[in-house]
Image: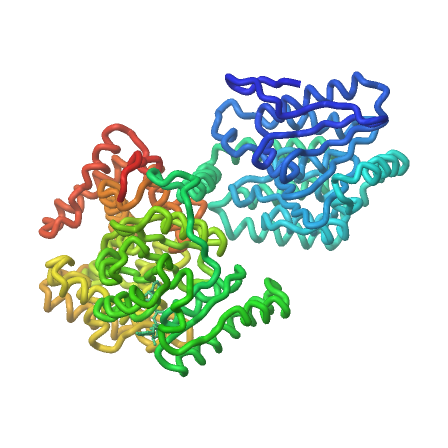
Amino acid sequence: MAVESGEEMAETVTFAREGALAVLSIDNPPVNALSRSVIEGLIAGFDLFEKDGSADGLIIRCAGRTFVAGGDIALFDNPAFSAEPLNALLDRIAASSRPVVGVLFGTVLGGGLELALACHGRIAAEGTAFGMPEIRLGLIPGSHGTQRLPRLVGLAEAARMISTGEAIGTEKALEIGLIDRIADPMDGAAIADFVGYVASRGRPEPAPLQGRADQEVLDGLRKTAAGKPQEPAYRAVAEALAAAIERPFAEGAAIEADWFARLVPSVPARAQRHLFFAERAAASIPDLPKESPTRSVEQVGILGAGTMGTGIALSFALAGFEVILSDTEQSAIDRAFEGLSDALGAFVRRGRLSDEAAKTTLARIEGAVGAAALASSDLVVEAVFEDMELKLAVARELGSLCNPGAIIATNTSTLDVNAIAAATGRPGDVIGTHFFSPAHIMRLLEVVRGKSTAPDVLQTILRTARRIGKTVVVSGVCYGFIGNRMAEVYMRESEAMQLEGASPQDIDRVIEDPAFLGMSMGPSRMLDMAGVDVGARTVIEWVASGAGPRDPAYRALCRRMYETGRHGQKSGLGYYLYEGRKALPDPDHSALCTGLAAELGIARRKHFPEEEIFERLFFPMVNEAALILEEKIAYRGSDIDVAWTSGYGFPRWRGGPLFMADEIGLARIVTGMEHYAARGGDPYGYWSVAPLLRRLAEEGGRISKWTSQGGRP
Ligand code: NAI
């Protein structure tokens, strides 16, 4: 039937008879999401099935590459959105006197799984994934999933699926009773046989749910919810599942509906929807057509087998690439292989990889001494020390030894990718790939597009990043690119406040407190872990190059810490004193701050309101982001949110720094910036408001939605 969808008529659901059975077939590429048209089509199709009394049963299936992979997330932002029409249909399906079965394959997620749960029987292909990912969008299942899933598979399994959002496979689904049989979805005879079986078994009585074990599961859910007061979806999971075992279906469904309606417009849910779309948008580049040509990448060479090189090698090997890992000395290669074995061992221990898969992965990596071994690689990533002279020498060498057409990537965290590209003599082949540590675990890959990077090189890296499971953000060339450039102002203020009298623990506490921000780690603990020496050396070089700030107090604290051997966790001393990994307040650090403040003529005070700590760290970051957008270093505000949530531990339920800034209100941030500028005199322009930020604040625009409308960074 044709179903109206907006302006167009779209044929997304068809009703047909196949012998004695009726078939509802959904065809809504790419993933058969439950759009309005699909829901209306299903309702109209089910009406036809009810009218057609001669059909013995109904099969619900999908065309294309998957059964329904979920709801249409974009619908949730429509104020008129309601789950009611779909839910009423699911009740009718469940109550049908004739058997209704779902034929499942691909990814059966969220609303797709709820549709399947309303059927009387489920048959699925080998290799199907089943999940309730709503929690990752700050939601709970809203079409009776919290009521039907525990009744079908028991509370413990349902709680695990709904509270983690993790998918399960076909074998597990069969074991817990989520599906009845495994069969090829194209095998008509097997499916007809299954419908007969479902008709003959009648409706099995759901097992009684109340019990001691269930109470423990509920207690666990409530404890998790209590630990995440900023994420109300966890409380909703606990309450909806409690209702599933304590109350009749209709009452439980009403509790689910009530929570769902409250959660959909809540800030954490809007924030995570923003990120869902932001992550998809980030890989599309305004002046790079989707179908741009790519270069072939099969063998990857890594130069520099240190912390980053080793993690990068593992990322590629895990995705099936052949990798050559090269360094100047055999001892560095040996150390790298110890690291690789440890990392793979950890994957095996956590059940993320089989022993066999770990061995195959390791076998894909070959060690080599000297760069010559990389001559035949399609992509070479250099991850040598962050030292410009060395990077330039390595670039010259790679430029002449790599195959024509091979891509040369630099993993620098702050250096000028254009200068490195020029040194290769083939700048079109060069791009920056800024991985995050540990590279085989962190999801973010900041891709740095040089001024001469060839379009097919950029496109190849974007595709390759997807193959190795990374979330990408594309940055133009500037000091620190997107992420570290913003982190720089954040570190600057953290250190400035320490010289003025705030302690590292005061600052970290505010930043880690979910009531303020909820970062996984505050600035001082973060730099102690990454290495104060690494951070300080970068700052020292930046300032020495003349491109950095002229302020003599600029990050004076970390520079002094570097000189005095306080290199962070690895040296036992940094912003904190370490007992193993435990960070303790350190009176010597406080004395160092007092002394340095006196040298620099900085007045100290005892009291730092939490509000001030938060504003002084957060507002200049947002301002820096506005500059990054104005300079077209980033294409969109949402890219910046992706970088911070995937690479810097910014909480996803905040949607990223710019989504959070929009929620705080840009006008308040501008006023705050002006307040601090007036208070300190602002000789170095740290607090001068970016024109884009001011304009958006005046117009009531949202910076997280801002895009540069094309053009190169
Ligand atoms: P690292 O010090 O752990 O490793 C560097 C490796 O490069 C060493 O094994 C060294 O022997 C090797 N090397 C030096 N010169 C070489 C040459 N001419 N040929 C071959 N190998 C050579 O350093 P790390 O931390 O792995 O950093 C590497 C790069 O990654 C730097 O540019 C750094 O800024 C960047 N980076 C570091 C991050 C981190 O968290 N550590 C994060 C993102 C980027």
- Residue 606, relative to residue 397: is it above or below? above
**Is residue 456 depicted above or below 120 in this figure?**
below
Q: Which residue is rendered at x = 25% and y = 28% of the image?
A: 699
Residue at image point 31% right, 66% down: 398
Q: Quadrant of the N terminus?
A: top right
Image: 566 above or below 510: below
Residue sitting nearer the eye, 279 or 654: 279
- Left/right placement of residue 140 relative to residue 528 reads right
For the C terminus, the quadrant is top left
Image coordinates of residue 27 in percent, x first then y, are: 63, 30
> Is residue 128 visible to the viewer in this orientation of the structure?
yes
Q: Residue 334: image x %, image y %?
A: 45, 80
Q: In the image shown, does 372 or 646 lie closer to the viewer?
A: 372
Q: Position of residue 195 (x, y in %)?
A: 84, 35
- Please state the total of marks drawn on the protein image: 0
Question: Which image quadrant for residue 655?
Answer: top left
Judge by depth and name the residue closer to the eye, 250 or 553. Answer: 553
Q: Residue at x 21, y 38 (%)?
A: 671
- Quadrant of ligand 1: it is bottom left
From this view, report whether residue 315 is shown above or below residue 125: below
Taking the view exactly as shown, the residue that stands out farthest to the front is 404
* x and y percentages locating residue 620 in the rendered image: 24, 48
Q: Quadrant of residue 39?
A: top right
Residue 84 can be seen in this image = no
State left or right for residue 689 relative to residue 635. Answer: left
Left or right: 672 in relation to 570: left
646 left or right, relative to 484: right
Residue, x 48% and y 73% (percent of image)? 366
Q: How is the image coloured?
A: rainbow
Q: Residue furthest bottom?
A: 331
